[in-house]
Each structure stands twice: as C-alpha cells, then as structure tokens.
Amino acid sequence: MENKEHIAKLTARALLLLFAILLLLSCKSKQEEPQYLLRTALLVNENHTWYKAFDYFGKIIEERSEGRIKVEIYPSEQLAKEIEAIRLIQAEVIDITTTGSTLTNWFEVATFCELPFLMQDSVDMARYIKGPVAKLMEKEMIEKSGLRSLGHFQRGERHLTSNRPIRHPDDLKGLIIRVPNVPSFVEAWTALGAKPTPMAFSEVFTSLQQGTIEAQENPFAMINNAGFAEVQKYVNLTGHVLSWVYPVIGEKQFQKLPEDLQAIVLQAGKDMQKYEHNLFLENEKNVQEELKAKGMEFIEVDKDAFQEKCEKAIYDSLSPEMQKLYHQLKAKKDAA
C-alpha cells in the first residue's frame, strides 16, 4: 500500500514538473515570437535564385532587427498563385511576393516590365529600370495595387519550349501555348498564329504532361527549375521577352512598421537585390548546359520574323496613353 502511495506521489510530482516545463516553454515561445511576421509567397521552389535571395533577406532582417522581424517563406505557390497572392497581401493575410507584368490587372504601365520584343539586351533593361517608366511603375504600384517595391530581380530572356522544333512563326500554327495572364502576351502569340492559354505557373507541368497544352515560354532558369525537360524536347531560342520582376511588400504592412524597421526592410531589399543578381549571373552560365544534359535540344529561330509578325498587334493592344509612352521609349532607344 505504501509503495502504491509512493508511486502515486512520484507520478503527481512528475506531472507537476512536466506541467511546469511546458508552461515555461510556452512562456519562452511567446517571448521569442517576433513583433512582426512577414509571410512570403513565392511561385518558385527552393532551388531557384529568388527563393535563395529571400532566404538571405530573412536572415539579415532577423539579425538587423534583433529578432523583431521574422520572414517565413512559402515556395512553389503553397500559399497562393501570383494574382491570389497579391489579393491576399491587399487583404493583409500575407505580406510579400514577387510580381511583374501581372500587375497590368491593376495598372497598365506594368506591361512594360515584360512587353514582347521591347528590350533587346541588359543595357536596354537597365535604362528602363532606372528611367521614368520604372519610377511611374513604382508610384502606381503603391497607389493602385497597394504594393511597395523592395528592389528588382533581372530575369533571363524568355524562350519557347515545345515538342516540335519552331524556327519560324509559320511553325506555330495552332500550337497551344501556356502564357501568364498578361494581355500583351496573349496578343503577341495570337498574332504569331499560336493559341495562347493563360494559366497559373503551378499548373503548367501537369498540363504539358497531359497534353492540355503543347508548349510554354519562360527563362532558362524557370524551365530548368520546373522540370520541363521531362515533358518538353525543344528550347526554341525566341528570346521574345527580356524583363525584370519586383519583390514587393504590402504598403499597409510596411506603414505599420516603425521607422527604424522600415529602414531595415528597405536596406535589406537592396542587399537582397545584389545577392540575387550575383546568383542569377552564376546560374545563367550553368543552366543551359544542365538543360542540354537533360536531353533538351536548342533551336535557333528567325527572331526578326517573330518580331515583325507580332509588333503591330502588341502596339494595338496598348491604350493611347501607353502607345504614346511606347513611342517615347523607342525614340530614346534609337537616340542612345
């Protein structure tokens, strides 16, 4: 009997001790919770330079804010697809994502992020990013979509992948191509003779596998990152878009931060941009060889024929105000 009582007392003490430990851990956990948690939705997976850049961003922000800010990253559209992510940021459900010409759903000037055949090289792109068009984009981004730019990530040229070689626009007839939900992309590929189908990036691999679509277009890194070599044979070097994407934070969320943390976030954004650019340059050297090693065949195309066939359709898809801006950009480029 005494032995049973002794065991009961020990059990009671053990349970009290366990309760005390759990209570202590709970208190500690609450104490360690950051003042500000920034939930980040990305369309790319953990191997992409954007994810690695945001991982770096999160580490330096947490360090510089002494734990007051923490960044949680959700890759591969786990939280939401791009347009949904923007709406969730506007609703203050999440806080950060990456976006570019998809912002045309809120303001038209964003189309210049990725207008087909507008920019020919990185010199062109640098001129636009530093010029009045990009300044107008960043202004309208805040005013019309409630997002604030944290910098920009350069994207490689977009190329068309398919299971038949495409050398000339005539080869595109009837080809079902996935495009992002951007009007200029739809207009361009329609004019070229294809059948463009807007679709979320996360649905592309399965749709190619099942034959719902026959082709897609993206930079080398995205083609490799998404595993498209498993379901596509050819990379047709159309180079039809040279562009950039913005890492963005909700403006409401940004304004809720005290000034010292706002400064930390903005500086971390600049540092993240530099970090990602170095990763991008290194990756561009290797990714083409990786795609070839995976069995993809690179096809040279008649780029002039592509541009000539869709240029008028792209121009006509713009509003009169954007057409005026288009002429200004072309004039500055010719004068450069």
Image (cartoon, grey):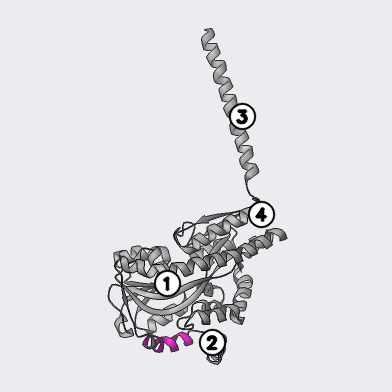
Q: Nearer the viewer, residue 144 or 285?
A: 285
- The residue located at (35%, 66%) in the rendering is 290
Residue type at tag 2: Tyr
Q: Which residue is the site of mark 1?
A: 219
Q: Earlier in the sequence, mark 3 or mark 1?
A: 3
61 displayed left or right of 289: right
Q: Which residue is the site of mark 4?
A: 65
Q: Position of residue 168 (x, y in %)?
A: 32, 84
Q: In which quarter of the view is residue 265 placed?
A: bottom right
Image: magenta residue range: 305-329
Q: Nearer the viewer, residue 16 or 284?
A: 284
Q: Position of residue 129 (x, y in %)?
A: 57, 77
Q: Earlier in the sequence, mark 1 or mark 2?
A: 1
Q: In the rendered view of the protein, which quadrant contains the C terminus?
A: bottom right
Q: In which quarter of the view is residue 197 placed?
A: bottom left
Q: Position of residue 209 (x, y in %)?
A: 30, 64
Q: Earlier in the sequence, mark 3 or mark 4?
A: 3
Q: Secondary structure at mark 4?
A: loop
* Residue 318 covered by magenta stretch: yes
Q: Secondary structure at mark 2?
A: helix
* Residue 145 covered by magenta stretch: no
Residue type at tag 1: Pro
Q: Which residue is the site of mark 3?
A: 20
Q: Which residue is the site of mark 2?
A: 326
Q: Earlier in the sequence, mark 1 or mark 4?
A: 4
Q: Earlier in the sequence, mark 4 or mark 2?
A: 4
Front tag of 4 and 2 = 4
Query: CA–CA distance between discs 1 and 4?
Result: 35 Å
Front tag of 3 and 4 = 4
**Looking at the image, residue 207 lies above or below residue 319:** above
The answer to whether mark 3 and mark 1 are in CB contact below 8 A is no
